[in-house]
Image (cartoon, coloured by chain):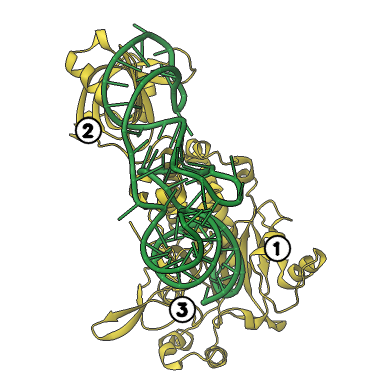
Amino acid sequence: MYEQFCPVRDVKDKVGETVKLAGWVRTSRIQKKLAFIVLRDGVAEIQCVVFQPDVSPETWEAAEKLTLESSLIVTGDVSKHPKMEGVYEIQVKEIEIVNLAENYPISKKEHGTEFLMDHRHLWVRSSKQAAILRIRDEMIKASRDFFYDNGFFCFDSPIFTPNACEGTTTLFDVDYFGEKVYLSQSGQLYQESGIMALGKTFCLGPTFRAEKSKTRRHLIEFWMLEAEAAFYDFEDNIKLQEDYVCYVVNRVLERRRTDLETIERDTVALERVTHPFPRIRYAEAVEILQGKGFDFNLGDDFGSPEETALAEDFDKPFFITHWPADMKAFYMKNAPNDPSLLLASDLMAPEGFGELIGGSQREDDADVLLEKIKKHKLPKEYFEWYLDLRRYGSVPHSGFGLGIERTVCWICGLHHIRESIPFPRMLYRKTP
RNA sequence: UCCCCCGUAGCUCAAUUGGCAGAGCAGCUGGCUGUUAACCAGUGUGUUGGUGGUUCAAGUCCGCCCGGGGGAGCCA
């Protein structure tokens, strides 16, 4: 069935030819003897013109009664738009209605957030939402391509985990045949096992945080890309992150420019995303904030207002490095010349979109790591396997995790993270 | 968990000091050969989220509950 249809995006190469299209009605405008029907096929859309004297009574009747989002098959000739340059349309010969839609709830007028979120299963059809989701797809595709092209293997981390990977945030628990297990908040520890087997690995999967976060930057369920590499030191890790982020942004600019236009994203801001990214140390960031009048001291963590204030000074992503040792996770390695600091970096998006990546060189000494586990008051027995990685051929290694939705938000310039994923799971939103 | 805001027609919103709940859009009917959120004319629409109270009178004021939004904390 599918093969007989011409994709809408290929129509421009078929002027004068007869084509058959299949899709849905985005909108229609009906006059006495002339009807304009905009058909979308999931990728692109095109206006179909029906002139009553030129078609059968059945086709004219079909054109007249088509409702928003009805599905249909259209046969017609491709022509150039009489008024608009570079725009094509279909002179309809025949319309076959596949399904006549009931009164579609999402109208062409504005709607509120609650209504749209209640109709998320339909909202994804709208042109902006569909464009965002295609950009998300490109971002994910580009991520996989980047790591495959750079010698990484996909090494999937489990989603059920026996304990808190990092021991910090609250986890969802699940009944596992009478035992309690948790939904993963990070796949990183398992990646560290992977690299000792395969050298360089990555995973891309869902992540769950049972925090009652209630902001435009947080999801309860989100997707994270995590990469890990053996014999990568802190510098190698920074370089990898820069290469990766630049690659992804370029791919979206190359392949999804039309969608960026649809959502009215300022692409100049994305074209500035080139090597190298600026870096500041945590201590410098504190000074910058104090200079901006914040009541902020060494050892304080950045909140949302602080992040925004720091980002004002940069027009591309920037790293904050060398965090104090007690502010981050237990597995991070201390700086060799100052043990009070960590070889850890956060990559912050410009334009106030917040943290995209958290990364670090990992502690590779079994004894030091054990001390850190104790210091963080984590149950040692759960980490025996993790300590084994340091006991049997430990090597210097580094890695990072990137939040897919945060990155989509930044690339698309979205106001709220809920539009960066098909079905967002938030504190007070778990349906549809 | 804390702070702030909202809930009125299918949707987006009005409603003066507490005084008969009403507009636009969508829907339906008709008109139009180039429309772009098309336009023009006609037409229907209500448990004002729920509950208790104050009052001659509550959409409006007060208490509680429910639903949602924004922010804080936490983080990607």
Residue lying furthest right: A291
Label count reads 3
In percent of width and height, residue A417 lies at 50, 56
Q: Amino acid at mark 2?
A: Leu
| First of labels 2, 3 by sequence position | 2
Which residue is the site of mark 3? A170
Mark toward the viewer: 1 or 3? 3
Which chain identifier belongs to the green chain?
Answer: B
- Would you say A391 lies left or right of A274 here? left
CA gap between label 1 and label 2 equals 57 Å
CA gap between label 2 and label 3 equals 47 Å
Chain ID for label 3?
Answer: A
Which residue is the site of mark 2? A100
Q: Amino acid at mark 3?
A: Thr
- Would you say A273 lies left or right of A309 here? left
CA gap between label 1 and label 3 equals 31 Å
Q: Secondary structure at mark 3?
A: loop
Q: Amino acid at mark 1?
A: Arg
Q: Nearer the viewer, residue A333 or A270?
A: A270
Do circles 1 and 2 both sit on a common chain?
Answer: yes
Task: Give the vertical position of A400 relative to A89 (above or below).
Answer: below
Task: Give the vertical position of A274 relative to A90 (above or below).
Answer: below
Q: Colour of chain A?
A: yellow
Q: Nearer the viewer, residue A268 or A92?
A: A92
| First of labels 1, 2 by sequence position | 2
Chain ID for label 1?
Answer: A
